[in-house]
């Protein structure tokens, strides 16, 4: 069973960003599935690496939109991305050094973080981008 499902309430109204959010949700579900299936730490770690890379791509894409359209919430938004990057770096390091076994709590954390970030922070730019005719 998926830990998180995309639905239209997650839509920020911009196709490229919605597609990236869907991709991230998909990766979190893959991670969850790999753990449920006991795929082994190596397989799970590789999904984690991919997910963090894609998260990085997404943050850059999103920040570029906000920069381009002069979103006043950009600095606060960037701080949230930065905070997540810090956590991701730490997790990645620990996974690579094998000091850390990925747990369901981590997947739950990623899923909760993403859900909350999209619904609260990302949603703040939705109306501005809609006004600017971005879709
Ligand atoms: Fe964001
Ligand atoms: Fe986002």
Image (cartoon, helix red, strand yellow):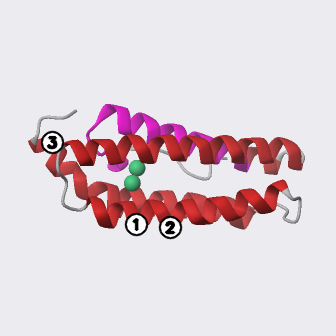
Expressed as whole percent of the image width and height from the top left, the position of residue 15 reads 32, 32
Residue 121 occupies which quadrant of the picture? Answer: bottom left
Expressed as whole percent of the image width and height from the top left, the position of residue 112 reads 53, 63
Q: How many marks?
A: 3
Residue pointed to by mark 2 = 83
Dominant secondary structure of the residues highlighted in magenta in the image:
helix
What residue is shown at x 67% (from left), y 58% (from top)?
107
What residue is shown at x 11% (from left), y 40% (from top)?
132
Residue pointed to by mark 3 = 130
* Frontmost residue, 36 versus 92: 92
Residue at far left of view: 131
Q: Would you call the spot at circle 2 few (<14 residues within 10 Å), some (14-19), or many (20 or more)? A: few
Say which quadrant the C terminus sits in.
top left
33 falls in the magenta region = no
Q: Which of pointers 2 and 3 indicates the residue nearer the eye?
A: 2
Q: Is residue 57 left or right of residue 47?
A: left
Q: Which of pointers 3 and 1 indicates the residue nearer the eye?
A: 1
Callouts 1 and 2 close, C-beta under 8 Å: yes
Disc 1 element: helix
Query: In this picture, which residue range is highlighted in magenta?
Result: 9-32
What residue is shown at x 72% (from left), y 56% (from top)?
92
* For residue 74, above or below residue 58: below
Disc 1 residue: CB within 8 Å of ligand 1: no
Residue pointed to by mark 1 = 79
What residue is shown at x 17% (from left), y 50% (from top)?
70
Residue 122 occupies which quadrant of the picture? Answer: bottom left
Identify the mark nearer the N-term, 2 or 3.
Answer: 2
Q: Is residue 18 left or right of residue 23?
A: left
12 falls in the magenta region = yes
Q: Is residue 89 left or right of residue 95?
A: left
């Amino acid at each position: 069973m998926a830990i998180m499902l995309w639905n239209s309430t997650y839509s920020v109204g911009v196709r490229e960003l919605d597609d990236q959010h869907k991709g991230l949700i998909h990766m979190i579900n893959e991670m969850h599935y790999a753990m449920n299936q006991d795929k082994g730490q190596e397989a799970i770690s590789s999904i984690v690496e991919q997910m963090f890379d894609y998260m990085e791509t997404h943050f850059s894409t999103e920040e570029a939109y906000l920069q381009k359209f002069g979103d006043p919430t950009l600095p606060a938004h960037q701080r949230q991305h930065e905070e997540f990057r810090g956590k991701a770096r730490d997790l990645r390091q620990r996974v690579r050094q094998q000091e850390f076994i990925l747990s369901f709590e981590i997947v739950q954390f990623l899923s909760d973080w993403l859900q909350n970030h999209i619904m609260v922070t990302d949603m703040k730019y939705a109306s501005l981008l809609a006004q600017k005719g971005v879709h």
